[in-house]
Image: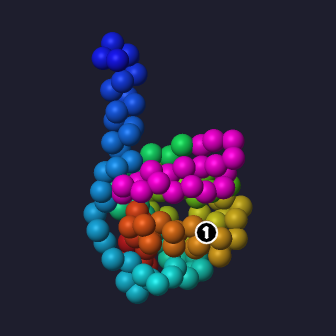
Amino acid sequence: MLDDPTLLARYRAAMDGQAVGRMVPSLPYVDGVPADPRLRVRLTTARAVLETGEDVVTLSAAGSVFEFAPEAEAVLRPLVDGRTEDLGALAETAGLGLEDVAGLVQELVAGQAAVVGSLL
């Protein structure tokens, strides 16, 4: 196995999704992310891994694995790239409803993989 040229790349990818993020409370939004287009979101870890499949998009971040519909890739890609984005901009870019994007972000906040706030 040590002769496999993809071994290190596979190991790094596996470990990246397990990197624990910086714990940042999303106060006052710990119980729910409102559908506020000005609310900003970012991941808590810089080492998230986004994998796209035919029927599912998988985000490995902060030691958790999240599965979403393929349409979520347009919401997740800028976050995985390290950007802080407004919920409204993510909804517009992805062509999704603001409520749907807020729900997706709520899953990430609950899993401590993302933080939301108006001053990020």
Q: Quadrant of residue 96?
A: bottom right
The foreground one among 69 and 1 is: 1
Residue lying at the far bottom of the rendered structure: 28
Q: Which residue is mark 1?
A: 101
What's the image's color scheme?
rainbow
Q: Quadrant of residue 10?
A: top left
- Residue at 28 percent across and 63 percent down: it is 22
Q: Does residue 95 appear anywhere in the picture? A: yes
The foreground one among 27 and 19 is: 19
Give the magenta range. 52-70
- Residue at 30 percent across and 17 percent down: it is 2
What is the quadrant of the C terminus in the image? bottom left
x and y percentages locating residue 52 in the rendered image: 59, 43
x and y percentages locating residue 110 in the rendered image: 44, 72
For the residue marked with disc 1, what is the amino acid?
Val
Q: Is residue 49 above or below residue 22?
A: above
Q: Is residue 50 above or below residue 36?
A: above
What is the quadrant of the N terminus in the image? top left
- Residue at 70 percent across and 71 percent down: it is 97
Query: What is the crowding at mark 1: few (fewer than 14 residues within 10 Å), some, or many (at least 20)?
Result: many
Q: Is residue 10 above or below residue 114?
A: above
- What element does badge 1 sit on? helix
